[in-house]
Amino acid sequence: MEAIIVALGLTVLAVILLLCFLSHENYLHGLFKLLASTGFIALCIASGGVRSTYGQVILAGLVFSWWGDLFLISRSSTIFMLGLISFFLAHVAYCGAFVVYGVSAPSAVVAMLLLLLPGVFIMRWLHPHLGSMRVPVYAYVTVISVMTALAVSAATSRGGVLLPIGAILFYSSDIFVARDRFVAPGRANAYIGLPLYYGGQVLLAMTPLYTQ
């Protein structure tokens, strides 16, 4: 438990420092971002992420996310694509973890149907701004929607409120990433999106506690 508290505290501190250095031109922004992301990996390990199949797959998703965070420090469209791929793989890993944890088909279908409305709205909102990125972004919206639906299904099937809350926070944070990249760039996106993102990742990182 002490290791969990230490890892959680360091992650929160790094996120606070990250929010204080949001300028893309400031190297401290990138440093604190990677420290915060390293923190959620450490938190997962402290929560038993290497002691169960579920935890190992969640840990893999967090590692993919770490690489995604590294790539998204850059404003380059090419490197942004690498970040998108990294996060796509992270969501595939989370999907696999939730299946391992235990889902039910009926609840997964219901959750997916409920997520269709915001998913369609987001795609219609982004569509005029995407250009050549339409296919990758549509694929990404699909996989994060499936991930969120499986998290809800896993929680309703076996319990574990951290799963759907973490997934929904992650889903919500990506709306602000998309807004910043494609619609209305600005630091306000990060001030809202980053706490949502790290909050979601921290909760997902702690879910291996359910399999102890």
Image (cartoon, rainbow, N blue to C red):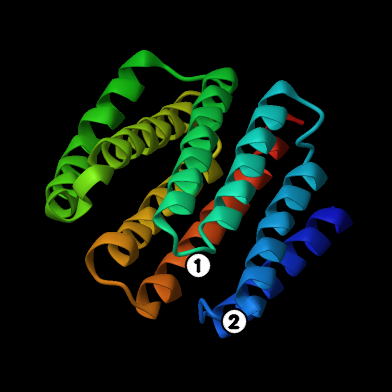
In the figure, is residue 175 to the left or right of 59? left
Residue 92, numbered label: none
Q: Which residue is the extreme one toward the top?
A: 105
Closer to the chain start, of discs 2 and 1, is 2
Q: Nearer the viewer, residue 19 or 185?
A: 185
SS at mark 2 in the image? loop
Residue 153 occupies quadrant: top left
Which class describes the residues within 10 Å of circle 1: few (<14), some (14-19), or many (20+)? Answer: some
- Kindly identify the residue that appears in the image at 72 percent across and 29 percent down: 56
Image height of 201 relative to 97, above or below: below
Query: Residue 124 location, x and y as percent?
Result: 12, 47
- Kindly identify the residue that appears in the image at 75 percent across and 51 percent down: 43
Residue 149 occupies quadrant: top left
In the figure, is residue 107 to the left or right of 48? left
SS at mark 1 in the image? helix
Residue 126 shows in this picture: yes
Residue 195, numbered label: 1
Query: Residue 207 location, x and y as percent?
Result: 64, 40
Name the residue that disc number 2 marks: 26
Query: Residue 65 location, x and y as percent?
Result: 58, 46
Closer to us: mark 2 or mark 1?
2
Q: Nearer the viewer, residue 21 or 109?
A: 21
Q: Nearer the viewer, residue 52 or 131?
A: 131
Which class describes the residues within 10 Å of circle 2: few (<14), some (14-19), or many (20+)? Answer: few
